[in-house]
Image (tube, helix red, strand yellow):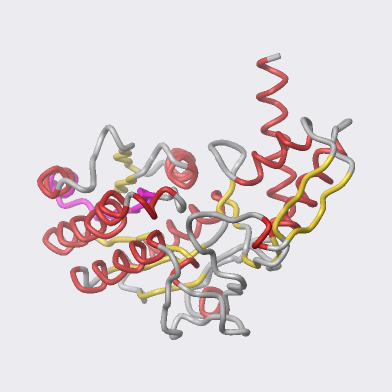
């Protein structure tokens, strides 16, 4: 089996590349400079080349415009990457018989349901980012018959830029952190997303079920709860500056883009229909903190 990984320089992309090497998969990995998914000719060429010898091909799309606030003033770029890019990939996959696994987000929901969201719930995004990701989902469904859409949330890793890394840094710089405590979601390790995406790709190539699936770390928590976990993990490894992690309401930390207040994902289908192992996020936070500190020690 051969993989194409797009967005190979991002958090999930890097984990997909590492997983491919670990499993001995024939890999074509592209970062943004290597393959611009908004260019239909470049996408068509890459998929055609990878399919030329008839090897079973899975395209794992981890490329995305993820600057949620910037997207409010940069909608054209957000839609180009998050809608048009997946459309080009889906069309190329359909043309060459490849399977497509596309990553999406819990931000397609408004967070007002008051109960866990299932895959059958109607999306209602609150931001340009959420709208662009929903448009990408729809483009994939329209153009690819063999696909899986993996909706996930609050991605973090021991590399790249993410909330866990920011909280770890601030825990060593400030004596007090003020973190939003009325938004709820699923912190999700990038490594777990990579494993889930690869699993879905293998299922698709074996003729298994595709469609949309919800996948995130458990249990659901708030940004404040995640920040406390980061501080606890850092404190177990040595002294930190922070003394207090104070909960604040969303209104006390205004942002250009509206975030959903409470998106708890029902992951019954992930477990029962797709055979995915839903991860606990706390052990992954500890591993990420250890990775950040190793980098800091090496630089020091």
Q: Is residue 200 visible?
A: yes
Residue at the outermost top position: 300
Image point (51%, 63%), residue name: 258
Is residue 163 positioned above or below 237 on the image? Answer: below
Q: Give coordinates of residue 291: x percent, y percent.
A: 67, 33
Pick whichever, 37 or 65, lies toward us. Answer: 65
Pick whichever, 208 or 290, lies toward us. Answer: 290
Is residue 35 positioned above or below 132 on the image? Answer: above
Q: Give coordinates of residue 263: x percent, y percent.
A: 58, 72
Residue 300 occupies quadrant: top right
Q: Is residue 54 magenta?
A: yes
- Relative placement, left or right, of 269 versus 116 is left
Q: Give coordinates of residue 210: x percent, y percent.
A: 35, 74
* Residue bounds of the magenta highlight: 47-65
Q: Is residue 267 visible?
A: no
Image point (43%, 71%), residue name: 125
């Amino acid at each position: 089996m051969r993989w194409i990984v797009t967005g190979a320089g991002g958090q999930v992309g890097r984990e997909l590349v590492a997983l491919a090497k670990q499993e001995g998969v024939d890999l074509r990995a592209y970062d943004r400079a290597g393959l611009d998914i908004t260019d239909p000719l470049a996408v068509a060429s890459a998929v055609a080349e990878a399919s030329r010898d008839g090897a079973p091909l899975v395209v794992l799309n981890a490329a995305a415009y993820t600057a949620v606030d910037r997207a409010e003033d940069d909608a054209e770029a957000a839609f180009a990457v998050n809608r048009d890019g997946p459309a080009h990939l889906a069309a190329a996959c359909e043309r060459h018989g490849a399977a497509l696994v596309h990553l999406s987000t819990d931000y397609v929901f408004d967070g007002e349901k008051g109960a866990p969201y299932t895959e059958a719930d109607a999306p209602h995004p609150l931001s340009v980012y959420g709208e662009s990701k929903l448009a990408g989902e729809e483009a994939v469904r329209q153009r690819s018959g063999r696909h899986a859409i993996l909706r996930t949330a609050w991605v973090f890793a021991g590399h790249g830029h993410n909330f866990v890394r920011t909280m770890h840094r601030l825990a060593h710089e400030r004596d007090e952190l003020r973190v939003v405590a009325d938004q709820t979601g699923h912190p999700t390790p990038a490594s777990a997303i990579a494993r889930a995406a690869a699993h879905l790709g293998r299922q698709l190539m074996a003729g298994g079920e595709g469609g949309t699936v919800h996948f995130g770390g458990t249990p659901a928590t708030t940004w404040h709860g995640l920040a406390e976990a980061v501080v606890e993990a850092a404190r177990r490894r040595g002294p930190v500056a922070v003394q207090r992690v104070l909960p604040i309401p969303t209104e006390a930390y205004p942002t250009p883009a509206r975030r959903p207040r409470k998106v708890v994902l029902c992951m019954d289908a992930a477990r029962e229909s797709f055979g995915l192992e839903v991860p606990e996020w706390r052990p992954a936070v500890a591993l990420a903190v250890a990775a950040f500190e190793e980098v800091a020690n090496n630089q020091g």
